[in-house]
Image: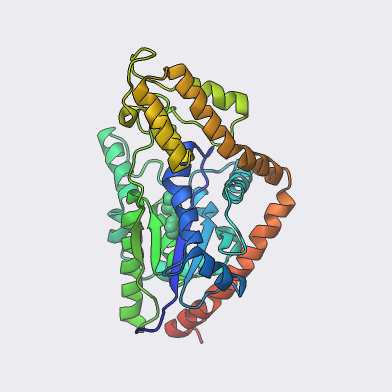
């Protein structure tokens, strides 16, 4: 039997605005799941392994970080910048991320990342950045509008993929679970790892993109995909009354009370099943088929969501009210991250001839 290898999984979370139900179901929930069920071990076995130390033998080391310096490309108001990082940290912790089981840190607290970014920049062909899709999309839009192709593009945006490559390569990561829109960035990280290895000898592990399993589209209030850009989201940590009002606004079909409803085409059901146990979901499905009215169905949805969210909501507020505690947790994560990063950065320095 092959010796068990340790697998390193990393994902960065760019601080944006309010976290909504779609973010939770599509990204946060699967990531937390991944952190709970390390490779080839039952959750119970892992409990044991995890208690014995951070870096696991033959399991997974999971790194979650707040990509705040990626956010700086856009967020250039100091107060907002600070707040957004705290909110993301509080969100993940409130939803059950256990900082003793993963390495949870803020990117800007790990200076090694930025040194590696520069070194990788010097090996990055400019043309590779020209082809990165986020930059390309802006250039195309500018050209269509008949303005300077680089209007509104700062160098942070342009070299975004190099910083992301440094995030990933510094930890010798194997797997990067991110959405489809980030797949190209992981490929660029791999290309840069190969370029470095070719030039200086085997140094970096080649990371792979891991596509999330949840491909289900989470419907928003109007039935379209829940997205900030459609203004149809349900923020996760709204006060109870607000949540209830939002749920009441979910678009339904015109089936009358007592007429059977089609669960699989109903946003109310699609949301319900993400928050309820299997048995309860089955019962709710039955009720819809039997023709429960939409008003009542929405009240049940509110109940199940509110039950699930009540505790995280309380925890979220508590954490946000205590930024010193968040700083303490993140500092501890940064300490671990820097420890993990040190051997790779020394090797890189040596390879380029700095010593
Ligand atoms: N670019 C990612 C996003 O916008 C965030 C990110 C930054 C990231 N660095 C990363 C994700 C490293 C995974 C690994 O979602």
Percent position of residue 250, x then y: 43, 23
Q: Please tell me which residue is depicted at 39% across the width and 53% down the height of the picture.
A: 158
Percent position of residue 292, x then y: 41, 20
Name the outermost residue toward the bottom: 355
Q: Is residue 218 left or right of residue 42?
A: left
Q: Please tell me which residue is depicted at 31% across the width and 32% down the height of the picture.
A: 264
Q: In the figure, residue 104 lies in which quadrant?
A: bottom right
The image quadrant where one finds the N terminus is bottom left
The image shows a total of numbered marks equal to 0
> Tell me, what colour scheme is on the image?
rainbow
Q: Please tell me which residue is depicted at 56% across the width and 27% down the height of the picture.
A: 243
Tell me which image quadrant ligand 1 sits in: bottom left
- Of 216 and 269, nearer the camera is 269
Name the outermost residue toward the top: 256
- Of 29 and 289, nearer the camera is 289
Q: Is residue 78 visible?
A: yes
Q: Is residue 68 left or right of residue 252?
A: right
Q: Is residue 229 visible?
A: no
Q: Height in image: 216 above or below 4?
A: above
């Amino acid at each position: 039997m092959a010796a068990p290898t340790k697998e390193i999984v990393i994902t960065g979370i760019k601080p944006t605005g309010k976290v909504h139900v779609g973010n939770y179901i599509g990204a946060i929930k699967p990531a937390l799941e991944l952190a709970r069920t390390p490779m080839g071990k039952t959750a119970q076995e892992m409990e044991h392994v995890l208690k014995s130390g951070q870096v696991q033998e033959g399991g997974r080391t999971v790194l979650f970080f707040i990509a705040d310096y990626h956010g700086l490309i856009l967020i250039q108001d100091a107060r907002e910048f600070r707040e957004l990082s705290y909110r993301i940290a509080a969100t993940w912790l409130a939803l059950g991320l256990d900082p003793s089981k993963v390495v949870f840190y803020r990117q800007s607290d790990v200076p090694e990342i930025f040194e590696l970014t520069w070194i990788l920049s010097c090996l990055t062909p400019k043309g590779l950045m020209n082809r990165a899709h986020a930059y390309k999309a802006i250039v195309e839009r500018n050209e269509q509008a008949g303005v300077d192709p680089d209007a509104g593009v700062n160098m942070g945006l342009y070299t975004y993929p190099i910083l992301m490559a440094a995030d990933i390569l510094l930890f010798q990561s194997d797997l990067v679970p991110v959405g489809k829109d980030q797949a190209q960035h992981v490929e660029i990280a791999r290309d840069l790892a190969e370029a470095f290895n070719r030039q200086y000898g085997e140094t970096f592990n080649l990371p792979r993109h891991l596509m999330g399993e949840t491909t289900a589209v989470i419907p928003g209030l109007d039935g379209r995909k829940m997205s900030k850009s459609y203004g149809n989201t349900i923020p996760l940590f709204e006060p109870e009354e607000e949540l209830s009002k939002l749920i009441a606004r979910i678009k339904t079909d015109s089936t009358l009370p007592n007429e059977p409803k089609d669960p699989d085409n109903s946003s109310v059901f699609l949301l319900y099943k993400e928050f309820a146990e299997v048995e309860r979901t089955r019962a709710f499905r039955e009720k819809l088929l039997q023709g429960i009215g939409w008003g009542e169905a929405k009240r049940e949805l509110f109940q199940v969501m509110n039950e699930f969210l009540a505790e995280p909501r309380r925890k979220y507020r508590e954490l946000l009210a205590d930024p010193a505690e968040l700083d303490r947790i993140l500092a501890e994560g940064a300490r671990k991250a820097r420890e993990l990063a040190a051997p790779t950065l020394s090797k890189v320095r040596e390879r380029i001839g700095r010593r």
